[in-house]
Image (cartoon, helix red, strand yellow):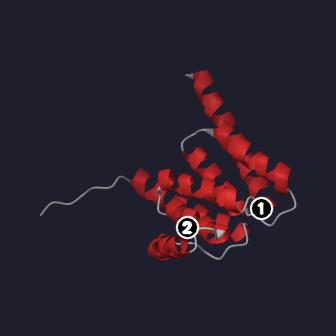
Amino acid sequence: MSSTRVGPRRVWHASLAFGVAVIVAACAGVSEVSPDEIPSLAQQVERDPSNGEVVARYAAALYAADRCDSAMTVARSAQQLRPDVALGSLVLGQCYEQAEQFDSAIGVYEAFLTAHGDARGSAAIQARVMLAQRENSRRVARQAIQ
């Protein structure tokens, strides 16, 4: 009998991604998003591809499933359909953060805040800006001492 061994870092990362997706969705005014919703959301998007809120929720579910490549593509669509819905920008920015592209993440967040600073979810975006700046500072500091 063979078994696939998953390292503790991978398990921690997957748990963190799901937890962050839940928090992000709550802060953006969306009910909890789960990877289990992906098939249902995909069908909803197929039926109504112009519904920006459903597209954003689909992006969040993909992010929660640790599928950032797909989540980023869907989040960009959500941003085009409903630029005032924070969830698309949150998903896109967090995928950039996950890839340690903090300047890109901060750019996405700040663009949303500039255009829609009073929109629902703005507080979550502001928090992500601070977290991305902190992580970027840590990365720069680590590089400086190596």
Left of 71 or right of it: where is 85?
A: right
Query: In the rendered view of the protein, which quadrant contains the C terminus?
Result: top right
Residue 117, picture quadrant: bottom right
**Which residue lies most toward the right here?**
118
Amino acid type at circle 2 is Tyr
Q: Please, what secondary structure does the residue beneath circle 2 have? A: helix
Q: Please, what secondary structure does the residue beneath circle 1 have? A: loop
The residue that label 1 is drawn on is 84
Looking at the rendered structure, the number of numbered marks drawn on it comes to: 2
Closest to the observer, 66 or 115: 115
Left of 18 or right of it: where is 115?
A: right
The residue that label 2 is drawn on is 58
Amino acid type at circle 1 is Asp
The location of residue 64, given as percent across then percent down, is 52, 63
Residue that appears at 66% across and 39% down: 104
Closest to the observer, 90 or 20: 90
The location of residue 55, given as percent across then percent down, is 60, 66
The location of residue 80, given as percent across then percent down, is 68, 56
The location of residue 130, given as percent across then percent down, is 75, 47
Closest to the observer, 143 or 50: 50
Left of 84 or right of it: where is 146?
A: left
Left of 100 or right of it: where is 1?
A: left
Which callout, 1 or 2, points at the residue further toward the start of the chain?
2
Closest to the observer, 85 or 100: 85
Residue that appears at 20% across and 60% down: 3
Residue that appears at 60% across and 29% down: 142
Query: In the rendered view of the protein, which quadrant contains the N terminus?
Result: bottom left
Is the residue 50 above or below the residue 6 in the image?
Answer: below
Q: Alpha-carbon neighbours of circle 1 within 10 Å: few (<14), some, or many (≥20)?
A: many
Is the residue 113 above or below the residue 84 in the image?
Answer: above
How far separated are the C-alphas under marks 1 and 2? 16 Å
Residue that appears at 58% across and 68% down: 49
